[in-house]
Amino acid sequence: MIELTINGRLVEIAEGATLLDAASKAGIHIPTLCHYPGLPSHSVCRMCLVEVEGETKPRPACTTPANQGDVVETDSDALREFRQSNGEWLLARHPNDCMRCEVNGSCKLQSLVAENQWEERWEEIPPGSAAHPEHSSADHTSPSIWRDLSKCIECGLCAEACGEAGQQQYVIGFAERGDERLPVTVFDDPLSETQCISCGQCTLVCPVGALIEAPHWHDVLHTLDARKRTSVVQVAPATRIAISEEFGMAPGTVSTGRLINALRQLGFDYVFDTNFTADLTIMEEGTELLTRLETQTDLPLFTSCCPGWVNWLELNRPDLLQHLSTTKSPQQMHGAIAKRGYFARSLGPEFAEGKTEPYVVSVMPCTAKKDEALRPGMSGDVDHVLTTRELARMIRSRGIAFGALSEDGSFDSPLGQSTGAAQIFGASGGVMEAMVRTAAHLTGREDQVPLEWQQLRDVREAVKTATIPGIGTVAVCNGIAAAQRMLETDAWRTAYVAIEVMACSGGCLGGGGEPKSMDPDVLKKRSKAIYDIDAKAPRRRSYENPDVRKLYDTELGEPNSIAAHALLHTTHTARRSDRSLLARFLDCVDRRDAEAAASLFHPDGVWSTASPFGDIRGADNIAALIRSGLPPRKFGPHFVRHHLEPPAVPDDLVVVTPDGQRCRFSMETCSIDADGRSRVGIRTLERHIL
């Protein structure tokens, strides 16, 4: 330990700590815009400059090591004057748009301006480089993440979170130099055309509103206010822990009851628990694992709950998709059951007859869940996805005193009952531990296998492993970077029978949609809370959920049955492949989204339907057929989709139609130029009945 003096206070701190660490321990606030726990600090913003006795120039507190005997001043007249000048220069480069900004009230720059009453004294200085207008300031093409570089303060945290110190995806990096420096995508491509996996870690660390989750909460609030639709909301396990932080509570505070009561006050008719379908996921995925073990095919099994991981595989390693479980994530299972299962039928004749459907919203710790809800074959089952941060904005906008709400609240039935195994889904290793509990039961080894697997629980360790009696060795990759490193060699193919991957470090507890926190131990505190819920649960294994058992008895039959596959499973395709393009088109046809379907065709494209409609020539005519020529779409239990069969070869386009007919498509693609960019579209699409 070393001792130093800060603002006249004697501070004792461990060697290797920075002056910022020492000040924080002493309760002394030093402003900073470019520092975030767990990422390298580069002292870019210069807000944290302090004076060290004996030094001729101020030093950045975030990168300057604390030394024995240092005497430090953090609040001199000169430092205050510099911070004011620096802050006012940032204001000149920042749009005066706080009232409409998504991070209004939680923006670090806004807080500094308000605290210090800085004024706009500089002339407006546009960010970026006039010589390079290709650095577009706004990009809303991604279904998960929005970029607005006019609000960027060039702190570099997004590049760190996406780069070597974080996710190692390198989608965002810096262009230009000096005052013209900006974080941009590779080749300035729209985010939707990059290798972005939508994990949202960039939005988690952004101190301003330059990178945000695509905002859905406005639309949700308007729908709830209108009271025209029966509304359903499902809540993920990580959300009930982390949302407490948005309202000033200590990290790790469990707010399940408060959250339920807040959602009811917002106007939701039914408040359900995503954990119900987490238990269902374990039944399906655990059975799938045992089936593969019996046949010794496509091992190891990759878990499929994390959409960021699924995105990464489809973008980077489509050759490994056969290892990926076909089980939908709990979010998508819940949406499918709420809209097309027994719950929808229970709402009344109009729902049961397919004339209407409930409005389904999910609250997730994850930004990638937003694009998962739009995936072909699943789109429409969840109408909107809110992050934990978005829900907090909704609650504040309605003036609900979250901290004063009662913690006495319960989820609605029948989609609200869960076990402890479902609770731990939010933590890295939780899915695997939950699956092990049920797999042990299904193999008759329940008494031989421990209930808790501590070796799978560390939120910091990159790769965790455990050997399960009668099953084999399993692995957990804590973060997408750990998974990438594992897949660099082929050792994983024989070392493990199952691999869990969560794209964000810490699992969903560290998801890109969670509250922003400067607490370096926040993941440990959230993790402890979620495992405490499991430890106190009356039922701790997924197969013990009575409502899940009832669902199988009355509707699904058994795990991995034909009925279960129709409702709870999906297919995966390589991105930018013919299969992916066909899946998107058929999804548009199923939902009768005529304009979106036609946009996938060349203006002079041809769709050979192998039906009485014959050959449809031209995108406009294709749109007209879908809009008015096909039977009106039905909803709820009567809505049936096209289904791509697993490919015999990578580009095999065999499809089962909604009426059960098997057919094969052949496709010719071409380049379509629009808005100054080129994309792949369909020139001809032919359907052949098998």
Image (spheres, grey):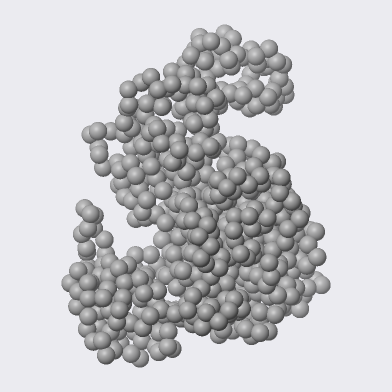
Quadrant in the rendering for residue 94: top left
User: Is 465 displayed left or right of 76 in the figure?
Assistant: right
- Taking the image as drawn, is residue 474 in sight? no
* Picture residue at 23% right of the left edge, 34% below the top: 131
**Image-based side of 607 in relation to 95, left or right:** left
Residue nearer the viewer, 602 or 100: 100
| Residue 270 in sight here | yes
The answer to which of 542 and 547 lies nearer the viewer is 547
Residue 284 on image: x %, y % = 62, 75
Instruction: Tell me the quarter of the image containing the C terminus.
Output: bottom left
Q: Is residue 50 above or below residue 271?
A: above
Query: Which of the 4 image quarters holds residue 54?
Result: top right
- Reply above or below: 616 against 202: below
Residue 386 in the image: state x and y as whole percent. Answer: 53, 55
Q: Tell me the residue at 45%/51% (across/down).
A: 214
| Residue 540 x/y as whole percent | 76, 66
Which corner quadrant holds the N terminus? top right
Query: Which residue occupies the foreground of this view, 400 or 204?
Result: 400
Q: Note whether 4 is above or below 612 in the view shown.
A: above
> In which image quadrant can residue 497 be found?
bottom right
Instruction: Name the residue: 50% across, 60% down.
Output: 226
Q: Residue at x 69, y 59 (%)?
A: 424
Residue 209: x and y, percent? Answer: 45, 40
Q: Nearer the viewer, residue 275 or 398?
A: 398
Horizontal side, residue 500 vs residue 369: left or right: right
Total numbered labels: 0
